[in-house]
Image (cartoon, rainbow, N blue to C red):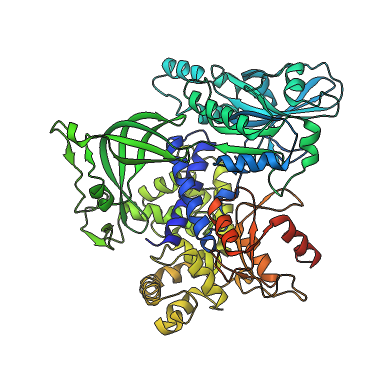
Amino acid sequence: MDVGERIQELADQIVVLRDAYYRGSPSVADAEYDAIEDELRSLIEANPELAPDPNPLDQVGAPAVLHAPVRHSRPMLSLEKATRPEQVEAFFSRFPGQSVVVMPKLDGLSLALVYENGRLARAVTRGDGTTGDDVTPLVRALTDGVPAKLDVQDRVEVRGEAVMLRSTFAAYNAAHPDKPLINPRNAAAGTLRAKDPATVAERRLQFLAFDLLTDSADADLERALTTMGFTVADMRHCDDAAAAQTVITSIEQRRNDLDYDLDGAVLRLADRDAFAAAGTRSSSPRGALAFKFAAEEKTTVLADVVWDVGKTGKIAPVAWLEPVFVGGTTVTRATLANQEVIKARDIKIGDTVLVRRAGDVIPFVAGVLDASKRTGDEQDVVPPVVCPSCGFPLTEQGNSRELFCTNVSCPAQTVRRLIHWASRAAADIDAIGGVWIERLAEAGILENPSDFYHLTAERLLEFDRIGEVSAARMIESIDTSRQVGLRRAMIGLAIPMASEGTAARLCRARFGSLEAVAEAGEEGLVAVDDIGPKVAASLIEHLTRLRPELERLREAGVSLDVREEDLPPVVAAGAPLAGKTVVVTGSISDPRSGEKVARPAFQRLCEKAGATIASSVSASTDLLITGADVGASKLTKAEKLGVTVVDQSEIWQQLQAADLLN
């Protein structure tokens, strides 16, 4: 599987898993979800031109769908991240003489509490950062640490984190062994997305405040919050970087002894006026910094290895572990790359293995603790010789000896391909989740993407738990997806070696339809930048095989033609970035709304401004455009090569001045 295909696979998984999670039925442990998200983030950072559009990582928190949406008075921004002491020193150097509070970075659900005339008027989740869900009744009924009344008549907004304490989590699971909660973080999110407070009455949450928006309070953040009656999470005042680093180390050492989950420490200017004066970047405040803790490593027993079938037939090994608490969450499964990795690390079933969460988010088996202490009961990990789903023979590909099922009609592949077609990056049939696609496939109703377009509300109503409203939404979503177009249809068909970048390049090369791509021949395809003979051969082979399906899609009214938005951008007159080769890194946000912007969309704006987009920093790079949560690698390389680094806010200003944002 090439990088682009892996990126798309991860993006699709995230969409499916988020849907299940926010509907109250999470299908994987928190650590497994974090691992998928972090792998996707790393791959996109290294290959920004392959970023999916839309990018699921650009969504902050949950979609505001379960309760009435409320727009925040000010966007609830993310925090700039740091992992090294020198970044802490740089933060202090930006604010000489200012006191800084250091506090745990809580792992719960962010809330904004709005008080009017001294009484709690609204409680709103973070949502997408700009708009959240009104959860006032649930917060009043289920959350401790939220005063019902304040001795302040002006409008006051207090922001903080609603967490489920570890002690509460343990007690709840002990009382409900038949349906335990996955982890405190998921439990907190699920509790505040319940429809009926009575159904989650035992899930008490604790609100811990970390921000205050008002003109009528003490300038010192901690003093102002505690005076009003709010609980804060152990704020420590520090006057220099050395003191702050000592507190950070202390928090990290005590992290497993605390009664709440955390994934780092937050540094923030103690004086609220100074914090406000520091201003914001496009998506993060300048007066705060999130310090992420180093990886944690624990030991557990490898209970089994199972082999999972992907949409292209790749058979991937998955480690099943005896539950182990690592970095604030219980890890039960971890993805093993391939059989060569298993062999290189000499991993056997029954081994006591080291499980590591790198960057506090990636769970993986780092190796065997001590092979000399094996008892002889351990078993070799034996790769399958036939597909676990359909029983067809497997083939090996590449130096890593990755396994692939040879049956294109494999049931597991079929379901994965259907889920992939319906994903946001492809046809975006958002009203039908993976669980329902699997059920419809099992019933023999769905086999190919074209089958979606023959579904009727009457047919859907034959299934339990699908009502008239749900059926109508599903059909409406399917109808909307008929305008999928060449680029996203190619992504949805999951052609091996053809990434999202491949689809975008074919559109920019002015191929008018999928059929035109199939008929171009190898010579015509390799003439397109970055498309080599192997990718061309894969495109021709699979699009030829899929020709009957393309005809069925056409007959169902599905557009497979290039869309205007995917054609080469028209460069504006007087383009401000004309002749510049630029690299974009970090999370991008529109400063006018505070909303996240998919990196490909921002890159397209830069192209309209005359820029040439590159994926990595080199001596030929003119500008490195930085958003929020920037990794250190590109910045270090830019500094070494003397490449100019500019904050995205400067580019947005240039785009607006060139009238490119209308």
x and y percentages locating residue 622 in the rendered image: 64, 68
Q: Is residue 389 above or below residue 355?
A: below
Looking at the image, residue 655 sits to the left or right of residue 514; the answer is right
Residue at the spot 75% in from the left edge and 33% down from the top edge = 98
Residue at the spot 67% in from the left edge and 66% down from the top edge = 606
Q: Is residue 16 above or below residue 27?
A: below
Inspect this view and state whether residue 266 appears.
yes
| Quadrant placement of the N terminus | bottom left
Instruction: Work out whether residue 444 or residue 2 is closer to the camera in this orientation and state it.
Output: 2
Q: Is residue 504 above or below residue 162?
A: below
> Which corner quadrant of the image does residue 105 belong to?
top right
Residue at the spot 45% in from the left edge and 83% down from the top edge = 524
Farthest left residue? Answer: 376
x and y percentages locating residue 9 in the rendered image: 44, 54
x and y percentages locating residue 546 in the rendered image: 39, 70
Looking at the image, residue 562 sits to the left or right of residue 490; the answer is right
Inspect this view and state whether residue 662 appears.
no
Looking at the image, residue 649 sits to the left or right of residue 166; the answer is right
| Quadrant placement of the C terminus | bottom right
